[in-house]
Amino acid sequence: MSTQLPLFPLGTVLLPGLVLPLEIFEERYRTLVRQLLTQSADEVRQFGVVAIRRGRETGPALPALHEVGCTAVVRRVQEHPDGRFSLITVGGQRFRVGELDQRGAPYLLGEVEFLPDELGDADAARAAVEPVQRLMRTYAQRLAATGTVQISLPDLPDDPIALSYVVAAAAVTDLTERQGLLAAADAASRLGAERAFLRREVGLLGKITTIGSSELRRVDPSPN
């Protein structure tokens, strides 16, 4: 069963549970925020964030969008004197985008189907929890050793679904890979992909850190 949802195309992937601050400049999205603020306090104020496959966030042309997105649940709104809004949102529920409507509102609307968070192969999902937790901690330590990136890891959950999203949000990866994790059919599939990613990255970072972070910092920056 589908429902209509306001859509916000962005050059990033929102995941369930991930905090996403937003600065709202464009008038069409200011209109969206104002309409959300008219909702009663017991209603969920949300819109859909969909990562851009090709194109730009701003401008009249509709960019090519990925098929799976995530709702952004509004937790805090600050209105500025010039009409801008600063939002704090949190990733809610995944959805699949169907038909798009550019005429029903100043902003983009989409017919979306909400996707359940399923465990998948329960045995495989539970078996992946400990290795993924261990690899994620090693990955964070080796990133820190390079002196370039610090990942502040919370206590990694034992629940396979929650863990799969925490790792997807914390890993330093590109939009395409993170989008693939968002769109994974279930937690078992997502954890399997994360295990492979973390093994690869831990191996690569192990080679880098044998140089030593002080050596890495002496490399001249690229002019590009």
Image (spheres, rainbow, N blue to C red):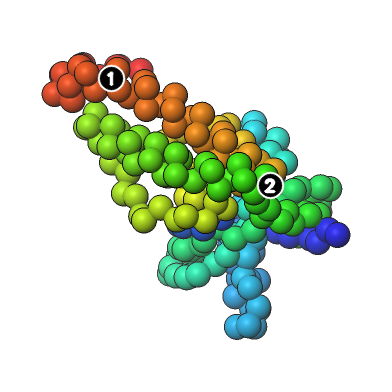
* Between 140 and 68, the one nearer to me in the picture: 140
Could one spot residue 118 in this view of the protein? yes
* Between 175 and 120, the one nearer to me in the picture: 120
Q: Nearer the viewer, mark 1 or mark 2?
A: 2
Q: Is residue 107 left or right of residue 151?
A: right
Q: Which residue is mark 2?
A: 120
Tell me what residue is drawn at x 65 percent, y 78 percent.
43
**Which kind of residue does numbered mark 1 sit on?**
Ile
Tell me what residue is drawn at x 35 percent, y 35 percent.
139
Q: Position of residue 130 (x, y in %)?
A: 44, 44
Q: Is residue 176 above or below residue 109?
A: above
**Which kind of residue does numbered mark 2 sit on?**
Gly
Tell me what residue is drawn at x 57 percent, y 65 percent.
73
Q: Which residue is mark 1?
A: 208
Seen as rendered, the residue at the extreme bottom is: 41
* Between 51 and 24, the one nearer to me in the picture: 51
